[in-house]
Amino acid sequence: MDFGWSAAQRDYLASVRGFATESLVADDLAERDAEGVFWREGWRRCAGFGIPGLPVTPEYGGGGHDRLTIVATLEELGYACRDNGLLFALNAHLWGCVTPLLAFGTDEQKKRYLPGLCDGSLVGGLAMTEAGSGSDAYNLRTTALPRDGGYLLNGDKVYVTNAPVADVLVVIARTGQADGPGSFSAFLVDRETPGLVTGPPVPKMGLRTAPMGALTLTDCWVPGHARLGPVGAGMSVFTVAMEWERSCILASAVGTMRHLLERCVSYAGGHERFAKPIGRFQAVSHKVVEMKLRLETSRLMLYHLAWSLTGTRRLPGASALVKLHLSEALVQTSMDALQLHGAGGYLTEEGLERQVRDALAARLYSGTSDIQRNIVARSLGL
């Protein structure tokens, strides 16, 4: 196992660092966060650099990067970019739409959608969750009935990241009567499809700059060639999306924790109380050391998982374990950073209270921390 980078990879990652540092600094972030505004210009800048097409092969306009390079790229973005909502929207686009299309799409579907998804002119998302399902995935009630050479979709989806701005959505619907995995199929649904209505962005505690909303499908007819994968493959499509998402969605969090550690070391070394830097007090220094420990363990787990998934080896429960550890580490490091900065950390202008609000969502999306524990427990035979 070698995490050493080639010269080409080092040059590429240096360019990512330079791009993010120069182009993803948004002076109006506090205002956009307060108003819940998606940073379209930031999306376009990321698209110009190739972020929305990281795993896509060059023939469709992507970068064709392997998982190790992808997570390293996302780490660099998390280090430099404070707009966590923008990064979350990019992840939803990549893992909810792009990777399922890569894995299950026909040549025609790939040619139609992937170039736009890569160049940023199309925004993608995944519509899976319903008010009565969520973690209970098999309980979804959206239906897709065969009709006139296609399918008639009816149902409601909630908590769909990118729904208010998405151009194409992967929709999981019931095509069978039983409750097993073969009773669901996946469909590519364009925004302008008659019968599809997307709601406005919903207010959230954190990640406010990531547009999230509900959608309603009312006699929404899609042609047969809009089905993604075979009939009954909906849960396989969802599983692929979740494996990618759980293993990659918190890669940017490693960069964020790196940024917070550096910020806290600088603050603790320069901020004085009782005639000495507060970093000299053990209560502070130990908190910073724990931040360092969480950063290093998180990076090792993330990169080991990416390395294992790049090859043929599969580690049962590994994606869930990494997602669990990184989400909990991000929350604790964010809270420690705020605590270390005292009253100043509580002020909106410092950005640390926003970081805490954004971090808390990591315990919920892509399966809650308790769901991840259940998955890992099953992998252990429990």
Image (cartoon, rainbow, N blue to C red):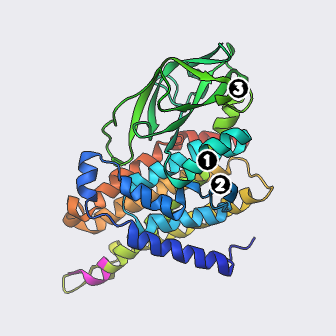
Q: Is residue 160 visible?
A: yes
What residue sits 39% from the left and 34% below the top? 213
Image depth: mark 1 or mark 3 in front = 1
- Residues tagged 2 and 1 counted as in contact (Cβ below 8 A): yes
| Foreground of the two, 171 or 359 | 171
**Secondary-structure class at tag 3:** helix
Q: Which quadrant of the rendered structure holds the C terminus?
A: top right
Residue 247: % across, % down: 61, 53
Residue 11: % across, % down: 59, 79
What residue sits 64% from the left and 56% below the top? 55
**Secondary-structure class at tag 2:** loop
Q: Residues within 10 Å of mark 2 (few under 14, many from 20)?
A: many
Q: Is residue 104 visible?
A: no
Q: Residues within 10 Å of mark 3 (few under 14, many from 20)?
A: some
- Residues tagged 1 and 3 counted as in contact (Cβ below 8 A): no
The amino acid marked with disc number 1 is: Leu
Q: Tell me the tag on residue 181.
A: 3
Residue 126: % across, % down: 54, 37
Q: Tell me the tag on residue 114.
A: 1
- Asked if residue 35 is among those painted magenta in the image, a careful observer would answer no
**Secondary-structure class at tag 1:** helix
